[in-house]
Image (cartoon, rainbow, N blue to C red):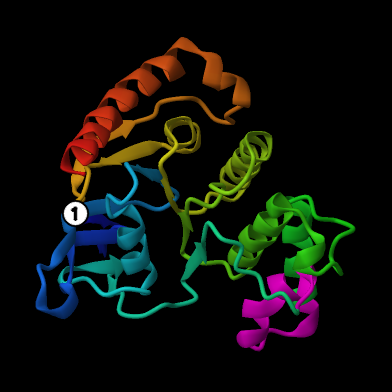
Amino acid sequence: MERRLNGAAHHHKLAIEAVGRTFAGVRGGTPTVALEPVTLRVEDHDFITILGPSGCGKSTLLRIVAGLDTPTAGRVLLDGTPVVAPGADRGMVFQSYTLFPWLTVHENICFGLREKNMPQNEQQRIAAHYIARVGLGGFEHHYPKMLSGGMQQRTAIARALANDPKILLLDEPFGALDNQTRALMQELLLGIWEAEKKTVLFVTHDIEEAIFMAGRVIVMSARPGRIKAEVAVDLPHPRHYTVKTTPEFSALKARLTEEIRSEALKVAAAA
């Protein structure tokens, strides 16, 4: 699956090749298949959302791409190189706010840059750029405990982007926020993506969020997780929140609601 460009082989940005994950049983009990073999290709500048019911293995898949978990089958390649451990080429944002509480907003954002021994003035320039991008001007010297959840998550996104990762991985990043803040955060992240064309893999169980953010929605089945459907989202960019009330959006929502509902029913029946 390589395209040839200017005589050179072109790899996918991210290639998830038949990746499966089984967790050993407790005290020799039955193992749990969290993820059936999943194959997914992500190209440069793609914004892909992974949608599925709770416990379908979508977070497990993201953790494997992040190098925080090891697949029991298959492999992950980023720019043709196998992923075997966490690395600065993948920026991860979790649902829980994972800022260092003893560092200010500015220091949190500069954390990865300091690790790279980047010159001070370059750190300042990059941090200032992303602080402005996520609308945290005036809060540079605040500590996380002084910030709302939404502001903490903006800081976490700025910190991930400041490292200039090849791919941004987000695991239900807005899941703990109230609806209004969540909607604003979706627009914020989408605006950054439209301006900077990062490559994004975004896990959510919220159907509207999955459609609004993505160019492609990957629907996962109930556990054991596998890719059940792939839905292209042909809504124009720049994407404005008013698109959520259009017939096109409603049609996508109806389709994905059916896909997810049938999976949720399987989960309920198995309980």
Quadrant of the rendered structure where residue 77 is?
Answer: bottom left
Q: Nearer the viewer, residue 266 or 206?
A: 266
Q: Which of 182 and 82 is in front in this view?
A: 182
Residue 89: % across, % down: 46, 72
Mark 1 secondary-structure assignment: strand
Left or right: 56 in relation to 214: left
* Mark 1 neighbour density, 10 Å: few (under 14) some (14–19) many (20 or more): some
Q: Start and end of the magenta stretch?
A: 103-122
Q: Is residue 42 above or below residue 110?
A: above
Q: Does the magenta stretch include residue 100?
A: no
Q: Is residue 11 above or below residue 255?
A: below
What type of secondary structure mainly makes up the magenta span? helix
Left or right: 61 in relation to 239: left
**What is the residue that sits farthest to the right in this orientation?**
138
Q: Which of 149 and 168 is in front in this view?
A: 149
Left or right: 205 in relation to 152: left
Residue 180: % across, % down: 67, 34
Q: In this view, does 150 lie above or below 181?
A: below
Q: Residue at x 44, y 31 (%)?
A: 211
Q: Which residue is drawn at 51% across and 13% down?
A: 246
Residue 12: % across, % down: 29, 57
Disc 1 marks a residue whose amino acid type is: Thr
Q: Does the magenta stretch include residue 116?
A: yes
* Residue under label 1: 39
Is residue 135 visible from the viewing direction of this image?
A: yes
